[in-house]
Amino acid sequence: MVQMNPYLFIVGCPRSGTTLLRRMVDVHPLVAVVDETRWIASFFERRAGLTSEGMVTPKLIHRLLDYDRFAKLGIGREDLEGLMASGEPTSYSTFVTGVFDLYGRARGKPIVGDKTPRYARKVLTLHALWPEARFVHLIRDGRDVCLSILNWKKSRRSIGRFESWREDPITTTALWWELHLRLAREDGAPLGPGLFHEVRYESVVARTGEACERLCGFLGIPYDDAMLRFHEGRERSGAGLNAKKAWRPVTGGLRDWRSQMPTVDVERFEATVGGFLDDLGYERAFPNPSSEAMERASKTRRRFVRELGERERRMPKDWRS
């Protein structure tokens, strides 16, 4: 099998279940999936440690070694310097491919990918760097995502930076969820079904084997039922451990907006992104939200979009008018 690494990127709105999907793919005997690099797109866009033309300089090695998450790859300075040893100018894409190849060799696997949810907003950048890379976009009902985010300790370091979060975390989360999904679909759809594949979290939970078989077909690798046993030998027990930290098998009902989300929050969420829920085929509890809920949603949306503009952040085409 001929391929270039990074071979795949698993993306989606944070708290959508990308860790579960990553663990299932990572256990495949041919594939290793790095857990959240986070630096690949941003370093290139900012030309961090690069020339203006995107060629690697020694500063990039220093930046990587100083980046806390890079240490998880187990790649040292000597290995990184070896990627530039030819003396010829090295492009960023070639250098990062070398990093992924090193990681794969250490794991004994030829195919290496990456799981970083926020890359749902960076599909264009990553595709430009690796035109043959494949994208797996995980979609989960936004109301369940909202439940997870509201209980996420790291929320204040991401979505919590938006001013509207302090006043209305439900509406802000709805918009944040829509932002990730729309950008991923907007950028991924033109790549075609050979490079862009959408997976529903609900299908992974309800029909795990079928979802894994379809995913392997998209990746061009043979299905291996080890993907269903990703948790074996890794389970942990202890008070307060959630499903992720406990390495539980695929478990349904961890988040269920129908039974766990207050009715007023459901209406607020659906008033904000009801049309998008419809487009995705998710049933609504409030097909006709109250005028008060709609007015609140409209006000927060304008504020959210304005802040994206002030931060010079990309937004979906439908939001720019």
Image (cartoon, rainbow, N blue to C red):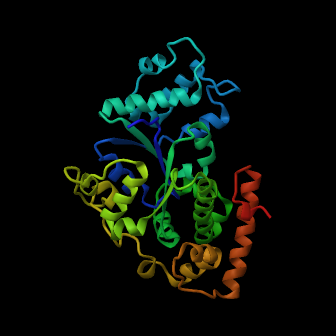
Which residue occupies 66% across, 31% down?
Answer: 47
Residue 116 position in % (x across, y down): 49, 48
Please state the total of marks drawn on the protein image.
0
- Tell me if residue 242 can be seen: no
Answer left or right for 101 relative to 243.
right
Answer left or right for 276 relative to 234.
right
Residue occupying the far top of the picture: 87
Which residue occupies 39% across, 28% down?
Answer: 102
Residue 276 position in % (x across, y down): 61, 72
Give the position of the C terminus as an image quadrant: bottom right
Is 271 rendered above or below residue 6?
A: below
Is 252 rendered above or below residue 186?
A: below
Residue 238 position in % (x across, y down): 23, 57
The quadrant in which residue 71 appears is top left
Task: Judge by depth and name the residue closer to the eye, 286 or 173.
Answer: 286
Which residue occupies 21% across, 53% down?
Answer: 232
Task: Judge by depth and name the residue closer to the eye, 276 or 221.
Answer: 221
- Tell me if residue 22 can be seen: yes
Residue 96 position in % (x across, y down): 51, 30
The quadrant in which residue 289 appears is bottom right
Residue occupying the far right of the picture: 321
The quadrant in which residue 304 appears is bottom right
Give the position of the N terminus as an image quadrant: top left
